[in-house]
């Protein structure tokens, strides 16, 4: 009976109109909630204006940043010419510190994403004695401000390395290992929390259905859970990579000779004063970020499109 | 694969999955913190570790007596930062969520994430360019005649500059968790509530806010904690009058390790209050869902 009714064009049109009205009403309500256009655009301006000014003045023909005096590429040439030179704070070169940053970021992101996703699965889907304690431990890195993380880990390594030297005579030094350990330690929780949020938003019934149909844990994870929480995992990994590239304090207190990262190199330059060379270097970093995040979002978009 | 393995894997999966992370965090996070905790009760010395016996409370006493102004200032700045981020961040998250097309949503999200992807130091430096004595804002004000030539507004080295830098730096931490909550939010609930006669404000406060509370709480925590412990922002945009606890800890840790450790512990105490609120909010949320 329903078929015959729906096949009549007149009624079908009515349904379509009704849908449109409803959708219109939802969007209208939502539009009012979002504060219309003004608040978001003011916010976007707030986020972008400083960066745009920075970029603009990296091309300014004067050394000052107060008035525009014409276009120049000089500051970029200066940056490229000095790529091999050491910064004020460390003997590392710009190229070397950039390479270190990418290496540390990649390794620590991979470790933190794998461990963090496992932890999130455990938290969201399993029950075992002591789970509350694990929940508490997960929060620890978020509770501890970076400065405390940095100095406590440095102190820990100092004591351990001292002990190793006294017992075995071997001399261990801070370097890539200590930085990566520190980055993974603060990134596990961020990954776990982002992934756990995806899992909490995902009904358990998908996985239960998979088990009921005879799939084991492994298959269920890779063929049901993983594809559904992939945006969360990618989001967590991106967050981890960003935080690793961004980190100054934990790296500063746990680095060794030759393992300084880009933030370590740049900090000395930035702190001293405003200069067009720093503007140029900052602009290059911004451009690299744009390409990176654009690529990852594009990949995510493709992934999402395929899932739909 | 054998069925017993499957059954066993499922039974112990929770523990096995959590174990590597827990070990990592205990070894490289909790243990170092315990060391700092113990150090905060010890006496200053010139040894390799920087501390010696006997145990004493004198570092805490000095922290509260000498540095109380800095402690209160840090707490105030962190709370304001969180509040401002929430007020600005919620509408942004809402705006992103309500874009009609996937492309529009991605662009709106991209525009939030991109500054966030830019190095934190660079973003803070951008404000130095704007706010400094011969910076862009002063140049602009001189250009349009509000300020006379050679005159300038003192904007750097003020509490406002630090607050601005912190809000700017941590805003995405607020937007992303709220957006994640909103993304799961089913907007048909708004329609249902409207059909049942609820007004927009009622819908917002009684449906949307409770449903996105995990995002709000997570975002506030993610902003408050780096704000209270901030080091780079007060260092670059502030001055001696805006010294915050993070800078103080870094400074004292090199010269007076027990005092640095005690200050760290006090900062963690402030954060603990925030954590209790987080735990309370999450429990309430799971009760609602359960």
Image: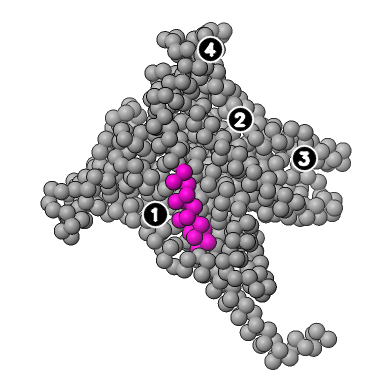
Q: Is residue A34 visible?
A: yes
Q: What residue is at 78 percent from the left and 55 percent from the top?
A: A205
User: CA–CA distance between discs 4 and 3?
Assistant: 41 Å
Horizontal arrangement in the rendering, residue A74 relative to residue B273 (left or right): left
Give left or right: position of B4 versus A72.
Answer: right
Q: What element carries label 4?
A: loop
Which residue is tagged 1? A47
Q: How far apart are marks 2 and 3 (CA)?
A: 20 Å
Vertical relation: A144 (above or below) A296: above
Identify which residue is drawn at 68% across, 73% down: B196
Specify whether residue B156 is painted magenta. Answer: no
Q: Is the magenta stretch mostly helix, strand or loop?
A: helix
Q: Are marks 1 and 3 in contact (CB under 8 Å)?
A: no
User: Where on the picture, by quarter, is residue A47?
Assistant: bottom left
- From the viewer's perspective, tell me whether residue B200 is left or right of residue B48: right
* Mark 3, residue position: A127
Q: Residues within 10 Å of mark 3 (few under 14, many from 20)?
A: some
Q: Where is residue B218 in the image (x, y as percent from the top left)?
A: 57, 47
In primary-sequence order, the first of circles 1 and 3 is 1
Which residues, given as a range, are shown in magenta? B79-95
**Mark 2 to mark 1 CA distance (whole Å):** 34 Å
Q: As rendered, which of B268 and A18 lies closer to the eye?
A: B268
Question: Count the marks: how many?
Answer: 4
Q: Residue extending furthest front? A: B65
Query: Dot 4 surroundings within 10 Å: few (below 14), some, or many (20 or more)?
Result: few
Badges 2 and 3, same chain: no
Q: Where is residue B81 in the image (x, y as percent from the top left)?
A: 44, 46
The one of B30 and B55 positioned closer to us in this rendering: B55
In the rendered structure, the residue with mark 2 lies on which chain?
B
Q: Mark 3 lies on which chain?
A: A
Location of mark 2 (residue) = B25
């Amino acid at each position: 009976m329903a078929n015959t009714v729906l096949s009549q064009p007149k009624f079908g049109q009515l349904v379509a109109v009704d849908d449109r009205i409803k959708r219109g009403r939802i969007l209208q309500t939502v539009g009012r909630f979002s504060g219309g256009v003004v608040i978001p655009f003011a916010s976007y301006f707030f986020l972008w204006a400083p960066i745009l000014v920075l970029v603009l003045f990296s091309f300014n023909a004067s050394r000052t940043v107060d008035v525009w005096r014409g276009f120049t590429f000089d500051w970029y040439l200066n940056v490229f010419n000095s790529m091999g030179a050491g910064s004020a704070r460390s003997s590392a070169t710009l190229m070397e510190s950039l390479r270190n940053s990418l290496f540390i970021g990649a390794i620590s992101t991979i470790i933190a994403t794998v461990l963090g996703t496992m932890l999130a699965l455990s938290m969201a889907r399993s029950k075992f004695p002591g789970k509350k304690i694990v929940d508490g431990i997960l929060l620890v890195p978020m509770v501890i401000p970076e400065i405390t993380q940095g100095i406590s880990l440095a102190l820990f390594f100092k004591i351990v390395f001292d002990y190793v030297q006294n017992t075995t005579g071997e001399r261990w030094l801070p370097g890539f290992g200590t930085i990566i350990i520190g980055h993974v330690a603060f990134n596990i929780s961020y990954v776990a929390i982002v992934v756990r949020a995806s899992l909490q938003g995902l009904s358990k019934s998908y996985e239960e259905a998979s088990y009921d149909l005879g799939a084991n844990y492994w298959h269920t994870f890779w063929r049901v859970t993983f594809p559904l929480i992939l945006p969360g995992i990618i989001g967590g990994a991106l967050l981890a990579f960003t935080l690793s590239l961004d980190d100054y304090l934990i790296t500063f207190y746990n680095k060794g000779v030759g393992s300084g990262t880009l933030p370590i190199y740049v900090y000395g330059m930035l702190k001293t004063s405003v200069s067009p060379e720093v503007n140029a270097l900052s602009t290059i970093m911004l451009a690299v970020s744009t390409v990176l995040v654009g690529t990852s979002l594009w990949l995510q978009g493709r992934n999402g499109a395929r899932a739909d | 694969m054998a069925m017993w393995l499957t059954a066993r894997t499922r039974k112990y999966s929770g523990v096995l999955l959590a174990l590597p992370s827990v070990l990592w965090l205990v070894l490289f996070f909790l243990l170092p913190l315990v060391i700092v905790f113990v150090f905060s009760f010890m006496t200053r010395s010139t040894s390799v570790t920087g501390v010696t016996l006997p145990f004493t409370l004198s570092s805490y006493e000095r922290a509260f007596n000498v540095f109380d102004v800095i402690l209160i200032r840090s707490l105030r700045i962190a709370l304001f930062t969180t509040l401002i981020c929430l007020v600005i961040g919620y509408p942004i998250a809402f705006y992103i969520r309500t874009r009609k097309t996937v492309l529009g949503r991605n662009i709106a999200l991209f525009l939030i994430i991109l500054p966030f992807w830019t190095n934190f130091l660079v973003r803070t430096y951008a404000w130095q360019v704007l706010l400094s004595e011969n910076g862009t804002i002063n140049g602009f004000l001189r250009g349009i005649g509000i300020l006379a030539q050679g005159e300038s507004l003192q904007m750097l080295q003020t509490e406002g500059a630090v607050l601005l830098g912190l809000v700017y730096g941590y805003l995405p931490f607020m937007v992303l968790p709220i957006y994640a909550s909103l993304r799961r939010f089913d907007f048909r609930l708004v329609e249902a509530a409207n059909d049942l006669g609820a007004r927009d404000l009622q819908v917002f406060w009684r449906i949307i806010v409770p449903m996105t509370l995990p995002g709000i709480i997570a975002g506030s925590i993610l902003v408050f904690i780096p704000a209270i412990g901030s080091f780079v922002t007060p260092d670059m945009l502030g001055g001696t009058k805006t010294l915050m606890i993070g800078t103080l800890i870094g400074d004292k840790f090199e010269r007076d390790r027990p005092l640095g450790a005690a200050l760290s512990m006090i900062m963690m105490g402030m954060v603990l209050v925030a954590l209790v609120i987080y735990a309370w909010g999450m429990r309430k949320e799971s009760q609602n869902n359960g």
